[in-house]
Image (cartoon, rainbow, N blue to C red):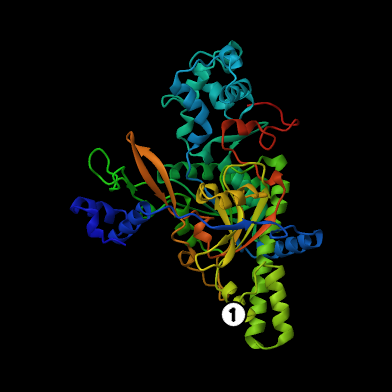
């Protein structure tokens, strides 16, 4: 690594770096990662049913549910939800249409064959069914036009202005977690509130308390806290559950630098170093600071309304129970072998557990392998059948030392110019919906230092722009990708219905989110 002196930093630069909690050495390391060749993951093969992905039997499921109930009553679980993202991606099609100056009326959209225009037409035609319709209607009433009248006119420009403009609802600027997601007979609920209700149904301990943690942006934390103070008493009354809640924000010390077209530190127009958020891998620090045995992780937008929640709760209980069971059995086998490391029958049975239950190759003595497994975090990840979703999936990945382990790998981590690697991607049978549960404590109950298990070279490098200029951006190893590379990972097939993400506004009209036939269409 080149020395920090090669960065040509003045006192103002050094002060800016120190103010974020970064060191000169870390900035130099990031610069070298950006300046070097791309670091792709080496796929050995996709994880498939029977080869890295488990399909649980009815008897196994029953055992997992029993294990979950015991651990949940003991208060061992916590729900961790990354909720700092803005809703702008949900409105991408609308934002692009508005900025392009295209005609936004029914006739123009119906005559277009462009997929994005057909999506716009579907959105406008059904916008009165969305949870945002209440706010939209009240805003349009205040401007002298009504929602129904505007929709019937076929001129959708006022709808776009009302949704997007900074002087109106300005929905893209809101946190996705605080956007109205679902409609009920007498109310609407945000994704944040739905996550609270799911956690209340899933994680309540014997004292009726559910533990929840949300990562939020600093600028929106007060809004989340205000929403919590408003809805928590309602949920407590409806579900007889209380919340032990906490919030955290992404630490400035996880920000990253960027390089310009000349390979130098990218600087803003006023000459300051540009620091960018380091991606969801930055949240490893937030996860590391939680006081919990087992932590469920799920994205803020993967949440459903009440009448579709039971299958999700069922399978999350199964995943959580399987993790508790596997951790308990791992520590039991370890304790037995510590007492009798040379007892052949015992070693053989422990090896069978490692192979069949954890899917590990016996490439070293069983007692030593059990020590390794007990000395690192473990996670159970639900995976769904791959139907062409963009994002990551379960793979067997070959490390630099030649060892092979199960990892979640994003498409961006695969070398597009390596035909063998892209074939592995094409043969993938499952997709990662980011629904997992993690064990964060060792045999003595002490929390692992999660930084010890990161593949520090599994970073993301992407071409971006700022102020109209191209740059190379760096993101830390993804939270469930390279940041968990050193963990023991178990993949379990779960039903597709448990994965209902909302990436675009139109997704809220899908089967997993739209009001059920029995739900009155009232504001």
Residue placed farthest to the front in the image?
419
**Residue 13 at what x, y percent from top left?**
23, 51
**Residue 423 at what x, y percent from top left?**
61, 49
Q: Quadrant of the C terminus?
A: top right
The answer to whether one can see residue 378 in this image is no
Could you tell me which residue is drawn at 48 percent across and 17 percent down? 102
**Residue 406 at what x, y percent from top left?**
60, 61
Viewer-nearest residue: 466 or 32: 32
Q: Which image quarter: residue 152?
A: top right
Q: Which residue is mark 1?
A: 368
Q: Is residue 382 above or below residue 261?
A: below
**Residue 239 at what x, y percent from top left?**
67, 48
Could you tell me which residue is drawn at 28 percent across and 59 percent down? 24
Q: Is residue 249 above or below residue 508?
A: below
Q: How many discs mark residues in the rendered view?
A: 1
Q: Quadrant of the N terminus?
A: bottom left
Residue placed farthest to the left in the image?
11
The answer to whether one can see residue 503 in this image is yes
Tag 1 secondary structure: helix
Q: Is residue 166 above or below residue 340?
A: above
């Amino acid at each position: 690594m080149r020395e920090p002196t090669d960065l040509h930093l003045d006192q103002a630069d050094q002060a800016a770096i120190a103010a974020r909690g970064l060191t000169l050495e870390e900035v130099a390391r990031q610069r070298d990662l950006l300046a070097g060749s791309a670091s792709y993951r080496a796929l050995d093969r996709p994880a498939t049913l029977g080869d890295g992905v488990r399909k649980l039997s009815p008897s196994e499921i029953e055992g997992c549910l029993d294990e979950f109930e015991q651990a949940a009553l003991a208060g061992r679980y916590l729900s961790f939800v990354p909720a700092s993202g803005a809703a702008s991606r949900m409105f991408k099609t609308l934002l692009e249409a508005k900025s392009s100056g295209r005609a936004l009326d029914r006739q123009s959209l119906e005559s277009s064959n462009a997929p994005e225009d057909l999506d716009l037409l579907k959105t406008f035609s059904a916008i009165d069914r969305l949870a945002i319709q209440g706010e939209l209607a009240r805003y349009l009433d205040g401007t002298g036009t009504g929602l129904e009248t505007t929709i019937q006119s076929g001129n959708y420009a006022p709808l776009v202005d009302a949704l997007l403009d900074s002087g109106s609802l300005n929905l893209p600027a809101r946190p996705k977690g605080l956007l109205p997601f679902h409609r009920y007979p007498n109310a609407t609920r945000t994704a944040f509130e739905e996550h609270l209700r799911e956690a209340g149904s899933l994680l309540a301990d014997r004292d009726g308390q559910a533990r929840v943690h949300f990562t939020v942006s600093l600028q929106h934390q007060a809004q989340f806290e205000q929403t919590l103070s408003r809805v928590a008493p309602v949920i407590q009354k409806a579900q007889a559950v209380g919340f032990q809640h906490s919030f955290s924000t992404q630490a400035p010390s996880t920000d990253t630098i960027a390089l310009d077209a000349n390979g130098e530190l990218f600087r803003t127009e006023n000459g300051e170093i540009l620091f960018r958020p380091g991606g969801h891998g930055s949240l490893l620090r937030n996860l590391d600071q939680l006081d919990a045995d087992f932590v469920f992780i799920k994205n803020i937008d993967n949440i459903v309304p009440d009448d579709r929640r039971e299958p999700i709760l069922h399978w999350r209980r199964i995943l959580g129970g399987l993790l508790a069971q596997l951790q308990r059995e791992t520590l039991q086998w370890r304790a037995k072998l510590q007492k009798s490391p040379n007892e052949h029958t015992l070693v053989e049975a422990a090896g069978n557990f490692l192979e069949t239950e954890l899917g590990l190759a016996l490439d070293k003595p069983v007692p030593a392998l059990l020590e390794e497994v007990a000395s690192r975090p473990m996670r159970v990840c639900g995976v769904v059948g791959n139907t062409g979703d963009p994002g990551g999936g379960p793979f067997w990945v070959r490390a630099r030392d030649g060892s092979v382990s199960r990892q979640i790998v994003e498409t961006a981590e695969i070398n597009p110019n390596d035909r063998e690697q892209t074939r592995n991607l094409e043969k993938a049978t499952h997709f990662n919906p980011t629904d997992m549960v993690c064990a964060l404590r060792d045999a003595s109950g002490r929390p692992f230092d999660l930084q010890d298990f990161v593949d520090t070279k599994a970073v993301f490098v992407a071409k971006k722009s700022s102020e109209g200029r191209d740059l190379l951006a760096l993101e830390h190893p993804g939270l469930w990708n390279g940041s968990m590379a050193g963990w023991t990972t178990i993949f379990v097939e779960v039903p597709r219905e448990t994965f209902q993400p909302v990436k675009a506004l139109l997704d809220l009209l899908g089967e997993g989110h739209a009001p059920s036939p029995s739900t009155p269409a009232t504001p």
